């Protein structure tokens, strides 16, 4: 099938760069990936993947307001007891131990 249409889209530079890197590992260009995506849209009659908001991590979900307040109280007690660490020190420890670069 001849390719005679041009598609112009706007996308965030960082998103594009990361996608190009990922697709490059797979041996694909952005153009080839978009072409594959559109073929899949036609084959399945819609988006070829689920579109939904991912669930919040368990560590930040609460069953009710009381559980949230209880966790906040625990955090406040830890602060009052000095059981905290400076964010810069914590990040340095992450970098040293795990090579974390954030």
Image (spheres, helix red, strand yellow):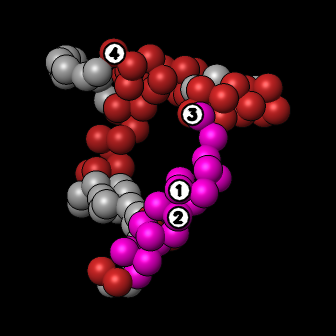
Discs 4/2, front: 2
Of the two numbered discs 3 and 2 on the same chain, state the one appearing first in sequence: 2
Residue 87 got which mark?
3
Magenta-highlighted residues: 67-86
Local packing at callout 2 (Cα closer than 10 Å; few below 14, some 14-19, many 20+) is few
Indicate yes or no whether the magenta region holds residue 73.
yes
Image position, residue 84 (x, y; %): 61, 47
- Please tell me which of labels 4 and 2 falls first in the chain: 4
Asked whether the residues under the numbered discs 4 and 3 touch, taking CB atoms below 8 Å apart as contact, a structural biologist would say no
**In the depicted view, which residue is nearer to us: 68 or 58?**
68
SS type, badge 4: helix
> Residue at the spot x=72%, y=33% of the render?
94
The residue at which mark 4 appears reads as: 13
**Which picture quadrant has residue 50?**
bottom left
Name the residue that disc number 2 marks. 77
Q: What residue is rendered at 48% in x and 23% in y?
A: 18
Could one spot residue 2 in this view of the protein?
A: yes
Q: Are marks 3 and 1 in contact (CB under 8 Å)?
A: no
Give SS at disc 1. helix
Mark 1 lies on residue: 80
């Amino acid at each position: 099938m001849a390719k005679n249409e041009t598609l112009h889209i706007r996308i965030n530079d960082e998103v594009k760069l990361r996608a190009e890197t990922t697709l490059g590992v797979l041996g694909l260009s952005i153009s080839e990936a978009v072409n594959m995506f559109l073929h899949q849209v036609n084959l399945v009659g819609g988006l070829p993947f689920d579109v939904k908001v991912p669930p919040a991590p368990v560590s930040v979900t609460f069953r009710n307001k009381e559980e949230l307040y209880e966790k906040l109280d625990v955090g406040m007690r830890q602060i009052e007891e000095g059981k905290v660490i400076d964010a810069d020190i914590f990040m340095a420890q992450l970098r040293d131990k795990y090579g974390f670069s954030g």
